[in-house]
């Protein structure tokens, strides 16, 4: 009987201890958990190249962060974890000299994290350092480089999919024994904000860091890339649907505002894009991207005679300047990227009250439009109007000389500039934008700045770049 009582007491104690352990476990781990795995195509195996050299990819430790009420609370600091994937190149003993390239990126298979703040402050940041310890700030994909609470890197808070960070990264060696090893550092940080982050309770992150010879994924078209960056205008890109107030309502995607990241390097493959080769994206129209030279091409007359006639048989001299002089200055490879397009050149009658939408209707929606098929044109008046911040789309373009408005229109050049539109009721006038930023008109024989404008073929690919002037988009 005594033994039975002792046994029952022991069972009762064990049961109580189990309940305590369960309670502690729940209290510790219900706040949040981040799990991450790092994989790559080769694990310690040598891949022999056609030249007899050997390239080896090795993964680092698995990335994982466990956030709980014990280690992630106000004032406790950020949570981090780091991994070090490597690539090693060994030269053939016949040459003792090897060079190759490889790509660096990552794949986010699952991510249930989201922003807990209204201004979308980054909460998951991936910091990447190359083999020399330099922080990688630009990338070959749609990642934003941010700094939050002193931590800098790519914002992956709500991202999923495959991301190229570096493509065709060079590696070389003169050793056929030890070779050379590039060690990369990937640091994942869960930022501890001063706000309530409980929305990410029990969130999951599954990420693969990838080093391999080919790009992480196939490239997309420039059109698809631009559309993929659309975020309701917060980055300056607006979708002009019929529901967007005061818009063109033509289902185009257009850049607006002070300084959107819409730079493209065109006509050069130089590592640093020459300023003369910087163009900017007006928008996406159908499946074609429209570019404009970011700086002046020079001062030219709209027409060599005191006439602005532009019809199916008569062309102003500005057309030859654009489609012969400028076009022939491009290498054939770049010429092939420009599509022959229908340009409506009937013009618009003068009105000091017209807003961007009204100019759009008269320039492009007029059923009696004069059409000229050519590769290179000039800016439309309505495009200049819609390049201003969206809150100015109800302002007459004649009033665009306001200094605040000028600073919020990325197409403002600060000089007298020709457009493609003429005044059909007059024989000698075409539209310009003057140095003050508002619409004006000028006699056709006067010399004004021109900026070549054209549409790219729909199959032009996005290769890399974030769209800033120092890191313009590269295309192929």
Image (cartoon, rainbow, N blue to C red):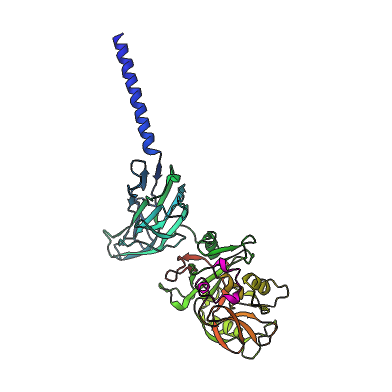
Q: Position of residue 177 (x, y in %)?
A: 26, 59
Near-viewer residue (86 or 412) = 412
Residue 403 point in image, percent of width and height: 51, 75
Furthest residue in direction top, as rendered: 1
Q: Main secondary structure of the magenta part?
A: loop
Side (left or right) of 376 relative to 12:
right
Q: Locate residue 233 relative to residue 65 in the image: left or right.
A: right
Any part of residue 21 in sight? yes
In the rendered image, residue 468, in percent from the top left (x then y), is placed at 45, 68
Relative placement, left or right, of 55 versus 216 is left
Magenta stretch, residue numbers: 388-412
Residue 156 highlighted magenta (yes or no)? no
- Is 405 included in the stretch rendered in magenta? yes
Q: Is residue 380 visible?
A: no
Residue 428 place in picture, x, y as percent: 65, 88
Which residue is drawn at the image coordinates 49% and 78% (left, top)? 295
Query: In the picture shown, does residue 402 fall above or below 171?
Result: below
């Amino acid at each position: 009987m005594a033994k039975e009582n002792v046994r029952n007491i022991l069972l009762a104690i064990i049961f109580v201890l189990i309940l305590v352990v369960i309670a502690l476990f729940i209290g510790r781990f219900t706040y949040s958990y981040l799990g991450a795995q790092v994989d790559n195509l080769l694990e310690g195996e040598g891949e022999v190249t056609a030249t007899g050299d050997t390239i080896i990819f090795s993964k680092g430790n698995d990335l994982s962060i466990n956030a709980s009420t014990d280690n992630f609370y106000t004032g406790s600091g950020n949570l981090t974890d780091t991994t070090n994937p490597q690539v090693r190149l060994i030269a053939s003993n016949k040459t003792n000299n090897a060079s190759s390239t490889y790509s660096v990126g990552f794949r986010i298979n699952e991510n249930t994290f989201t922003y807990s703040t209204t201004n979308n402050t980054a909460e998951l940041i991936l910091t990447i350092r190359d083999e020399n310890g330099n922080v990688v700030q630009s990338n070959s994909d749609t990642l934003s480089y941010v700094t939050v609470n002193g931590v800098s890197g790519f914002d992956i808070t709500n991202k999923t999919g495959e991301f190229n960070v570096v493509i065709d990264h060079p590696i070389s060696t003169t050793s056929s024994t030890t070779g050379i090893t590039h060690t990369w550092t990937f640091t994942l940080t869960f930022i501890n904000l001063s706000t309530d982050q409980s929305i990410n309770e029990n969130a999951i992150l599954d990420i693969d860091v990838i080093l391999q010879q080919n790009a992480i994924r196939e490239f997309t078209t420039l059109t698809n890339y631009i559309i993929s960056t659309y975020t309701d205008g917060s980055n300056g890109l607006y979708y002009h649907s019929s529901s967007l107030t005061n818009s063109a309502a033509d289902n185009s995607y257009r850049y607006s505002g002070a300084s959107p990241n819409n730079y493209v390097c065109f006509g050069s493959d130089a590592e640093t894009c020459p300023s003369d080769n910087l163009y900017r994206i007006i928008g996406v129209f159908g499946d074609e991207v429209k570019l404009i030279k970011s700086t002046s091409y020079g001062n030219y007359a709209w027409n060599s005679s005191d006439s602005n006639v532009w019809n199916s048989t008569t062309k102003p001299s500005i057309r030859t300047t654009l489609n012969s002089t400028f076009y022939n200055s491009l290498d054939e490879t770049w010429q092939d990227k420009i599509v022959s397009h229908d340009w409506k050149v009937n013009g618009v009658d003068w009105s000091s009250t017209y807003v961007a939408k009204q100019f759009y209707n008269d320039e492009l929606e007029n059923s009696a439009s004069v059409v000229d098929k050519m590769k290179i044109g000039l800016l439309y008046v309505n495009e200049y109007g819609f390049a201003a911040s969206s809150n100015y789309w109800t302002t007459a373009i004649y009033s665009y000389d306001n200094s605040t408005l000028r600073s919020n229109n990325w197409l403002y050049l600060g000089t007298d500039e020709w457009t493609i539109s003429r005044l059909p009721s007059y024989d000698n006038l075409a539209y310009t934008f003057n140095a003050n930023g508002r619409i004006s008109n000028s006699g056709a024989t006067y010399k004004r700045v021109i900026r070549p404008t054209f549409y790219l073929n729909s199959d032009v690919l996005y290769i890399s770049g974030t769209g800033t002037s120092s890191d313009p988009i590269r295309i192929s």
